Image (tube, rainbow, N blue to C red):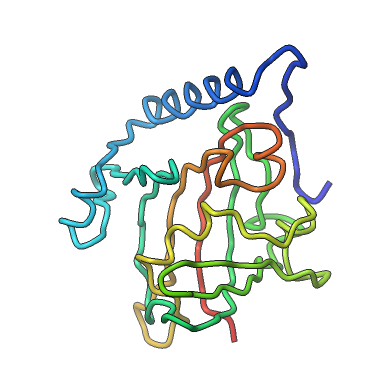
Amino acid sequence: MVGVIVFASCSDSETYADQKKKERSAINQYIADHHINVISEKTFFAQDSTTDVSKNQYVLFESSGVYMQIVRKGCGEKIKDGETVTVLCRFSEFNILTDTLQLTNNVGAFSYMPDKMSVTNTSGTFTGAFSTASNGSLMYTAYGSTSVPGGWLEPFSYINVGRPQNEGDEIAKVNLIVPHSQGQTYATQGVYPCMYEITYERGI
């Protein structure tokens, strides 16, 4: 239903600490299996806030635990301080714990429906809300929350959010490894990490 394939579950005897340990192990295994080169924030900033895709670099943000790879910085410009922007996203969500594609609007019946969210920049802190319209957000439809996961908001300090105007213009694209604490409602409750492939485009 609405593209949701499987959710992680946990035993009643499993403590929160056990669940976090299992999550950490799953993230580490995913990084090893996919030959991800984790770089520090210091290295990331020294590279002009970019990740070298040819080296499969992901930057780890220590404060949130989110790993980010910028595939494309995107056309246009960043969301300005004090500005609220409609952002359209296409994404695929993979449950790292169960190694499954969990939700996507890139294929099938949902390909016509980019997720729509309203994003505000307040002195460098980004907040967002998904649209509740019937054709506005697969994330809202699946998880019943308008809150945009913190992991989805992490890239906005570093990417441009525009609309292609000229030949060669491309919208921003990132890959994210998002721990449960920065994830959607079900991930937070189930204590499981997700990997996302997301594009960001400025809405009209």
Please give the name of the residue rendered at 28% of the width and 36% of the height, measured from the top-left corner. Answer: 37
Residue lying at 50% horizontally and 24% vertically, measured from the top left: 26
Indicate the quadrant containing the C terminus: top left, top right, bottom left or bottom right: bottom right
Percent from the top left, x then y, of residue 168? 34, 77
Residue in the foreground of this view, choosing between 183 and 159: 183
Front-most of residues 94 and 27: 27
Q: Position of residue 78 (x, y in %)?
A: 39, 77
Q: In percent of the image, x 47 and y 21: which residue is there? A: 25
Question: Of 14 and 23, which appears nearest the observer?
Answer: 14
The residue under the point 17% across, 57% down is 47
Above or below residue 31? Residue 42 is below
Q: Is residue 188 left or right of residue 166?
A: right
Q: Position of residue 92 (x, y in %)?
A: 59, 50
> In the picture, residue 23 is in which quadrant?
top right
- Who is closer to the viewer here, 54 or 78? 78
Figure quadrant of residue 140: bottom right
Q: Is residue 179 above or below residue 33?
A: below
160 left or right of 104? left
Left or right placement of residue 96 versus residue 80 in this view: right
